[in-house]
Amino acid sequence: MFAGCFLRFHWNLRLPCPNPSTPRPSQTPPSETHPAKPTQRDHDQCNWCRAVTGNGEIIDRLPCVDDARGANRARVYISKQNLNMPRSSLRRPGQDLDLSRHLIDTDNLPETLSSGSLFGNHLPLELEIGSGKGLFIDNAASMNPNHNYLGIEIIAKYAKHSAAKLARRQSTNAMMISGNAEPLLANLVSAESLEAVHVYFPDPWWKKRHRKRRVLNESSILNLTRCLRPGGRFHFWTDVLDYFENTVELIAEISPILGVPIPEDKIPATHDLDYRTHFERRSRQNLIPVYRVRYEKRDR
């Protein structure tokens, strides 16, 4: 309830412009008591607005004003706007759908998580932490049959939903684990055995005292670094700027072997589900900036 009130209260928050008193092509000079309201064309011509909203996307309901506090308020608004977005209900798998080849719980895991133990082959293995509704792992496994994909999802109903997607498509190179990724990565994945690790839109855990619960913390970053082969990739996307900046700084501090963050481009969507994940779809459709990077592990 509080989040909803917060968002409605901040609906008209405005972004600061460095030169608000300078007339723009579509404006008459504003007076002191009645400043002119910028148009969408004004926003498109304002580099400050473009920079604050990120990725070149303009949030036209946040007009420019000369307000030093506006920038911080706008960042909070942009980051938390998705809290009030409705989520569609999960489709229940049919009772006759066999999930035994695509869903494993933590009580039935092999001694090590590898392509050999899970898929019976030696193809490169990619790991997704926090698969959610399974859009990425389903699409990636379909487009890359020469790689194996393992998704780990801590919420059982989402792990089951993702596994059902794989089962309906009769995927032979992807499966889900229902459980907590951190101990599995620490104890069951061998060093330099992963081709890639994917973390997309993890829970930001907004409160400072809860940040130790974030998927990307000091321990998990060191573990995924250990598990990646030299040249292996780590993909990290989020729509929370604070989470993004903290993670990039932490990686630079404790795991320099991952190298420098390489920006990943936004790819235009050609249909309604042509996105990396459902969270990316929601963020882009609601004009929320998405921060995308990948790392490539260096040789020693």
Image (spheres, rainbow, N blue to C red):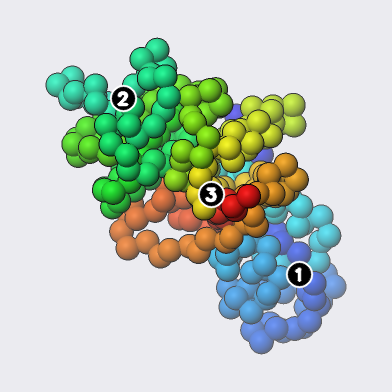
How many other residues sit within 10 Å of disc 1, few (<14), some (14-19) or many (≥20)?
A: many
Circle 3 SS class: strand
Residue 116 pos. (x, y %): 32, 32
Residue 51 as seen in the image, left or right of residue 299:
right
Circle 1 SS class: loop
- Considering only order in the chain, which callout, 3 or 2, is on the residue closer to the N terminus? 2
Quarter-wise, where is residue 243 in the image?
top right
- Considering only order in the chain, which callout, 3 or 1, is on the residue closer to the N terminus? 1
Which residue matches tag 2?
Answer: 103
User: Residue drawn 48% across and 35% down?
Assistant: 129
User: Residue drawn 63% across and 61% down?
Assistant: 53
Distance from disc 2 to disc 3, alpha carbons, whole Å, reads 29 Å
- Specify the amino acid type for callout 1: Cys
Of residue 202 and residue 9, the one placed in the foreground of this image is 202
Q: Most extreme residue toward the top, as rendered?
A: 107
In the rendered image, the vertical position of residue 152 relative to residue 67, given as above or below: above
Asked whether the viewer can see residue 147, the reply is yes
Residue 47 pos. (x, y %): 68, 74
Of residue 237 and residue 232, the one placed in the foreground of this image is 232
How many other residues sit within 10 Å of disc 3, few (<14), some (14-19) or many (≥20)?
A: some
- Specify the amino acid type for callout 3: Pro
- Considering only order in the chain, which callout, 1 or 2, is on the residue closer to the N terminus? 1
Asked whether the viewer can see residue 91, the reply is no
Circle 2 SS class: strand
Which residue matches tag 1?
Answer: 17
- Specify the amino acid type for callout 2: Leu
